[in-house]
Image (spheres, rainbow, N blue to C red):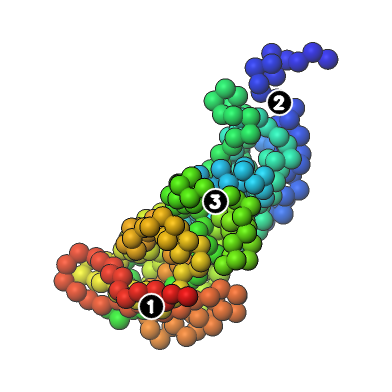
Amino acid sequence: MSQSAYARAGVDIHAGDEAVELMRSHVARTRRPEVLGGIGGFAGLFDASALARYRHPLLATSTDGVGTKVALARALDVHDTIGWDLVGMLVDDLVVCGAEPLFLTDYIACGHVVPERIAAIVKGVADACVAAGCALLGGETAEHPGLMGADEYDIAGATTGVVEADELLGPDRVRDGDVALAMASSGLHSNGYSLVRRVLLEDAGLALDREIPEFGRSLGLELLEPTHVYAGEVMTLLRTVTVHAMSHITGGGLANNLVRVVPDGMLVTVDRATWRPGPVFELVRSVGRIGEEDIEETLNMGVGMVALLPADQVDEARRVLGGLGLDAWVCGRVEARPGPAAVELVGGHPRA
């Protein structure tokens, strides 16, 4: 059978269909009762009548990608973890305002559809959606021959959640005397990889298969460590204790993200001595000869999420998060101070 004109131009519709079939079971695992229909339609459907349980529902939405971390997934030929990075970047921007993630859609652009690779990517997205309690409602796989190399791809997505209006978290709730509770990151997450790749792979010439004793594994596997998805733990926390505001520590680092949920007239002082960043952060800093303030404006330095909450809620919050396997510690405090909102990092991280 001769190829179609579209196939000769580099777009394989049959490969796309095969990818859909391979990913179907993964998508099915994310299904929530409110989801109508299945994948393959023109649009995903979600029964909004389920939101009637909210007195005044506010919808929250977030769009993001995973940046240049996909270059490492391609180099290592490991594609079933990058979806965790996407979901983490999306749903954890919702939960910081108190919103429950409802559904997510993804978009994969590639130079050539390899059905097994696309299915592996979607498997990671689905696994993370299950962890977050979020339905994978649909998506799109687009083949871009001539624009992207045959083995190149990029991934992005969008998500929607809901929060009760009078339970919306934010700067207006923060009070003098609140405590900053840090939650550990799983590693670099999905920010700063342009810097990391430049410093470690290009400038220092380190190989991805090089074993790093401090990591207990290869450099490549450490760099590919998936983003921790906090949504499930955070929603449990919000049902258990009083939280005033939360910050997802992504691009820009701890101070630049935390200040986004601090009101004018308040200062959050964060003590670096309360935690030791993982060895990957020290490797990037030392090999790149990067100053502490500089690297803190790019990488999360071991903190993936911060909650601002009343001091009398801290012990219970740590108990809840610890019971879910998430390390959390008091890293700072809020105090009233005239002037614009501010976050100040003091002290130094413990060194090994």
Circle number at residue 273: 1
| Mark before the other along the chain sequence, 1 or 2 | 2
Rendered location of residue 299, percent (x, y): 42, 58
In the figure, residue 140 lies in which quadrant? top right
Q: Nearer the viewer, residue 202 or 125?
A: 202
Q: To which residue does mark 2 refer?
A: 13
Rendered location of residue 312, percent (x, y): 40, 86
Q: Nearer the viewer, residue 223 or 87?
A: 223
17 sits left or right of 61 in the view: right
| Mark before the other along the chain sequence, 2 or 3 | 2
Mark 1: few, some, or many residues within 10 Å (few <14, many ≥20)?
Answer: some
Tell me which amino acid carries mark 1: Ala
Residue at 58% x, 46% y: name it.
72
Tell me if label 3 and label 1 are in contact, CB under 8 Å.
no
In the figure, residue 222 lies in which quadrant? bottom right
Query: Closer to us: mark 3 or mark 1?
Result: 3
Asked if 74 appears above or below 85 in the picture, the reply is above
Tell me which amino acid carries mark 3: Leu
Residue at the outermost left position: 338
Mark 3: few, some, or many residues within 10 Å (few <14, many ≥20)?
Answer: some
Rendered location of residue 130, percent (x, y): 65, 58
Residue at 62% x, 42% y: name it.
74
User: Rounded to the nearest whole Å, what is the CA distance between mark 2 and mark 3?
Assistant: 39 Å
| Mark before the other along the chain sequence, 3 or 1 | 3
Tell me which amino acid carries mark 2: Ile
Q: To which residue does mark 3 refer?
A: 206
Asked if 68 appears above or below 271 in the picture, the reply is above
Tell me if residue 295 can be seen: yes
Q: Nearer the viewer, residue 181 or 80?
A: 80
